[in-house]
Image (cartoon, rainbow, N blue to C red):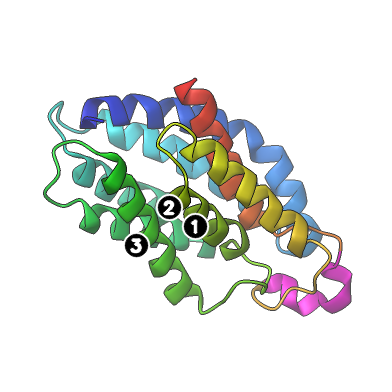
Amino acid sequence: MTGDVLRTVLDRAFEILAESEDELRDLDAAVGDGDLGVTVRGGTSAARQAMRSLAEAATPAEIFRALAAAISSANPSSFAALVATALLAASRSVATSQSLTRDDVVTMAQQAAAAVEKRCKSALGDKTVLDALIPSVRALEAATSEEGLDAMIAAARRGIDETTPNVSRRGRAAWLGERAQGHPDPGAVAYLRFLEALQRATS
């Protein structure tokens, strides 16, 4: 996938993701401060604008760096910071690539997940975005190129479903104790919605 194709796909995916603003706001309001919808709306808008400002020959790494800067600047929130961290890790892993191969995509996903895990100081089961992110990356590693995105979505959904009954151990939701039980982690759902948006953008 060339940089030009990548931009086209991501532009459509961000447009679709913005449709989840109200859902993510309500999910976050149940366990946090309710700003995730605003973060996603502002971040997707800034990301799309940043991609339009890039040169036509921009490489995948340049695109990811631009997205990281735009999203982190649009909303100074913890989730935006995690997204920027993931994007910067992805950009470093394909620094010399003019187009993306399947192996590049797997490496990007692995490096992004590792960077997010390190930054948020959490682990699987803590009821964070990692409960969707890490299983989806593992599913990608095991899948063929044709079924990779479908496998990631299914794994992310399972991760969310399995941890929804849990008590949150990180972030604002951890303050709620047992009251957070039965509510999915909003960041994990936002990540799932992004994967689903990618699926729609590439179908």
- At horizontal 65% and vertical 36% (from top left) the residue drawn is 20
Seen from the viewer's position, the closer of residues 26 and 158 is 158
- At horizontal 29% and vertical 33% (from top left) the residue drawn is 51
- Is disc 2 in contact with disc 1, using a CB cutoff of under 8 Å? yes
Seen from the viewer's position, the closer of residues 22 and 180 is 180
- Rendering coords of residue 166 (x, y %): 80, 70
| Side (left or right) of 201 relative to 30 | left
- Is disc 2 in contact with disc 3, using a CB cutoff of under 8 Å? no
Q: CA distance from mark 1 to mark 3?
A: 12 Å
Q: Quadrant of residue 135?
A: bottom right
In the rendering, which numbered label is found on residue 138? 1
> Magenta residues?
172-181
Can residue 179 be found in the magenta stretch?
Answer: yes
In the rendering, which numbered label is found on residue 111? 3
Q: Quadrant of residue 93?
A: bottom left
Q: Amino acid at mark 3?
A: Gln
> Reading the chain from its start, which is encountered first: label 1 or label 3?
3
Q: Amino acid at mark 2?
A: Glu
In this rendering, the answer to whether 200 lies above or below 194 is: above
In this rendering, the answer to whether 122 lies above or below 159 is: below
Question: In front: mark 1 or mark 3?
Answer: 1
- Rendering coords of residue 164 (x, y %): 79, 61
Q: CA distance from mark 2 to mark 3?
A: 12 Å
Local secondary structure at mark 2:
helix
Can residue 96 be found in the magenta stretch?
Answer: no
Q: Classify 10 Å Cα crowding around label 3: few (below 14), some (14-19), many (20 and above).
A: many
> Which residue bears the numbered disc 2?
141
Q: Amino acid at mark 1?
A: Arg
- At horizontal 85% and vertical 67% (from top left) the residue drawn is 181
